[in-house]
Amino acid sequence: ALALARRSCHLALADISAEGLRESARLLAHMGVRVTTHLLDVADREAVQSLPAEVQAAHGRIDILMNNAGVALGGSFEQVSEDDFEWLMDINFNGVVRMTRAFLPMLRRSDDARVVNVSSIYGIVSPPGQSAYSASKFAVRGFSMALRHELEGSTVGVSVVHPGGVATSIARNARIPAGAPPEEIERGRKIAERLLRLAPDEAGEIIARGIERRDARILVGSDAKAVSILERLAPVNYWRYLKKATSR
């Protein structure tokens, strides 16, 4: 949000956390742009469907839709319950689809609009213990690619973002399945601490520059770029190399 505000973008912020919205509005108060906040659960279909009218009333138009809502879920496929798997997919993937469907008619009225869907480095590679999360992020990637082709020639472009190790709270707040071995949980926590190093503000600047360039694919961080290259060079065996890197 800060990176877009620096570029004089007015902002409609939607989040499930009222506290998070208040803090974001506070940080943006001095930026000289109009900021509205909207309490929203992207898993709530009716709430999502009503949001475009709220944004229209407050801002009159929308040029960029950024779908960034996401949750994490640790554990192997056999450890993760069906309910937890569906909970994650409903937010990480279905939420992106719902928001895009709701706002696309409004975006089409813009002379130069963009849908920006946030996938993940795990939408490029799939490590063990991330079956649900990786599935959702590959789904976001595939949806974004198909939508970009469908909208080719229109005034609406599509970007998919693959952040690497950005220091956000998503890993710390990951849902842990009941019965997961404590040593696995601790190992995952340590790996996250080691990998999540890129400052959110720096990540935001990279994404904003990608939007300005109208990039179809935005890789955030040197780790995302390296993993993208590795996956192309060793599409079957990449985990052999990544495992060595993350075990150091």
Image (cartoon, grey):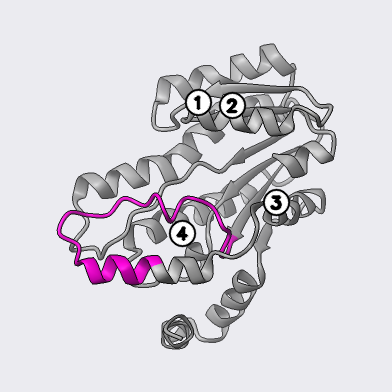
Q: Secondary structure at mark 4?
A: helix
* N-terminal label among 1 and 4: 1
Label 4 to label 3: alpha-carbon separation: 25 Å
Can you tell which of label 1 and label 4 is closer to the viewer? Answer: 1
Label 1 to label 2: alpha-carbon separation: 6 Å
Label 1 to label 3: alpha-carbon separation: 21 Å
**As displayed, is residue 117 above or below residue 38?**
below
Q: What residue does disc 4 label?
A: 138
The rendered magenta stretch, by its main secondary structure, is classed as loop
The amino acid at mark 1 is: Ala
**Is any part of residue 105 visible from this angle?**
yes
**Image point (78%, 36%), residue name:** 5
* N-terminal label among 1 and 3: 1
The amino acid at mark 3 is: Asp
Q: What residue does disc 2 label?
A: 22
Q: What residue does disc 3 label?
A: 201
Label 2 to label 4: alpha-carbon separation: 32 Å
Q: Quadrant of the N terminus?
A: top right
Can you tell which of label 4 and label 3 is closer to the viewer? Answer: 3
Q: Secondary structure at mark 2?
A: helix
Residue 65: where, in percent of width, then height?
65, 36
- Assess whether mark 2 and mark 1 are in contact (beta carbons under 8 angstroms): yes
**Image point (65%, 62%), residue name:** 220
